[in-house]
């Protein structure tokens, strides 16, 4: 299954991305007046955050899925932003066309990481920044850790089949990301953990978008909850141990970010 329904995606993971985007932009050192490229822009969360961070920033977003590009255009609604259909593996831009090339939570989606990172570096001007990040799936996203623990207990064979299709950088750590950046010819490589908390007013606010089926993960969750007769939802609710008397709670979140400087 590919990504579908950008409005549902925005409710599911877009809310997390919105919290992460400003942290990532600061890490990448984006400045007002720059022209940035947002690869795998999805619903345009990063582009919108960049536009909000400076009065003269311009953003180009690319994504291979037409419905997401249409959503991003409408959500940004800003003459400084452009969006078009394109793949990071073959960016339709000249060498050095951008001051910075960024990817928010796309590293785990790269089928050919070296080619994709190389394209990001190619379209970045000399001394421009190339930066990207991904969730830390090795304990940095407790909400996913809980899901996979429960999924393995309920349907271990289905989990094995799902995980057989994960892409090369899904479980990469900071060292591997830094090595990939250096291999692409980028200098001054930095890698860092970006952390924040995500609040929820109720379990329902958290859970419903989780099962909308907007991503391969949430589609898997929705199907597992259906075939288990709602047992996944019941177990997940019972698994939470930090719920306040008013029903609110929060999850910690951690992303792994890497940046480098394009060569002359």
Image: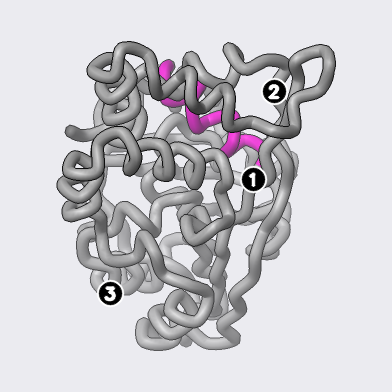
Nearer to us: label 2 or label 1: 2
Provide residue 53's location: percent of width, then percent of height: 73, 43
Figure label count: 3
Numbered disc 2: secondary structure: strand
Callout 3: SS: helix
Residue identified by numbered label 1: 20
Query: Image check: 224 left or right of 15?
Result: left
Between 180 and 221, the residue placed more toward the observer is 221
Q: Quadrant of residue 218 in the image?
A: top left
Mark 3, Cα crowd under 10 Å, few <14 / some 14-19 / many 20+, is some
Tell me whether the residue at label 2 lies in contact with that at label 3, contact meaning CB atoms closer than 8 angstroms.
no
* Foreground pick, 244 / 117: 244
Q: Kindly report the distance in space between the C-alpha atoms of the residues bearing marks 2 and 1.
A: 16 Å
Q: Which mark is residue 104?
A: none
Displayed quadrant of residue 212: top left
Residue in the foreground of this view, choosing between 50 and 22: 22
Query: Is residue 190 in view?
Result: yes
Residue pictured at 34% horizontal, 39% vertical: 153
Side of 123 where 250 appears, left or right: right
- Does the segment drawn in magenta span residue 219? no
Identify residue for label 3: 114
* Part of the protein shown in magenta: 8-19
Q: In the displayed image of the protein, which residue is found farthest to the right?
A: 245
On the image, the x and y values in percent for residue 67 come to 29, 23
């Amino acid at each position: 299954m590919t990504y579908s329904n950008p409005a549902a995606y925005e409710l599911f993971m877009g809310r997390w991305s919105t919290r992460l985007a400003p942290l990532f932009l600061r890490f990448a050192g984006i400045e007002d007046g720059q022209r940035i490229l947002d690869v795998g822009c999805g619903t345009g969360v990063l582009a919108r955050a960049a536009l909000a961070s400076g009065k003269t920033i311009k953003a180009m977003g690319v994504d291979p899925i037409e419905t997401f590009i249409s959503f991003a255009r409408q959500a940004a609604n800003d003459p400084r932003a452009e969006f078009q259909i394109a793949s990071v593996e073959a960016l339709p831009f000249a060498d050095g066309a951008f001051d910075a090339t960024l990817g928010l939570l796309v590293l785990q989606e790269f089928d050919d990481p070296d080619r994709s990172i190389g394209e990001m570096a190619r379209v970045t001007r000399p001394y421009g920044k190339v930066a990207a990040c991904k969730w830390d799936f090795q304990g940095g996203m407790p909400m996913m850790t809980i899901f996979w623990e429960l999924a393995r207990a309920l349907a271990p064979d289905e989990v094995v089949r799902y995980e057989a299709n994960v892409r090369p950088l899904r479980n990469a750590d900071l060292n591997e990301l830094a090595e990939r950046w250096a291999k692409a010819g980028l200098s001054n490589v930095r890698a860092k953990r970006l952390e924040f908390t995500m609040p929820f007013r109720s379990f329902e606010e958290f859970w419903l978008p989780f099962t909308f089926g907007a991503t391969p993960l949430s589609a898997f969750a929705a199907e597992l909850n259906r075939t288990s007769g709602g047992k996944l939802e019941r177990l997940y609710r019972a698994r939470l141990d930090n719920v306040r008397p008013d029903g609110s709670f929060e999850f910690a979140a951690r992303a792994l970010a890497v940046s480098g400087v394009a060569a002359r």
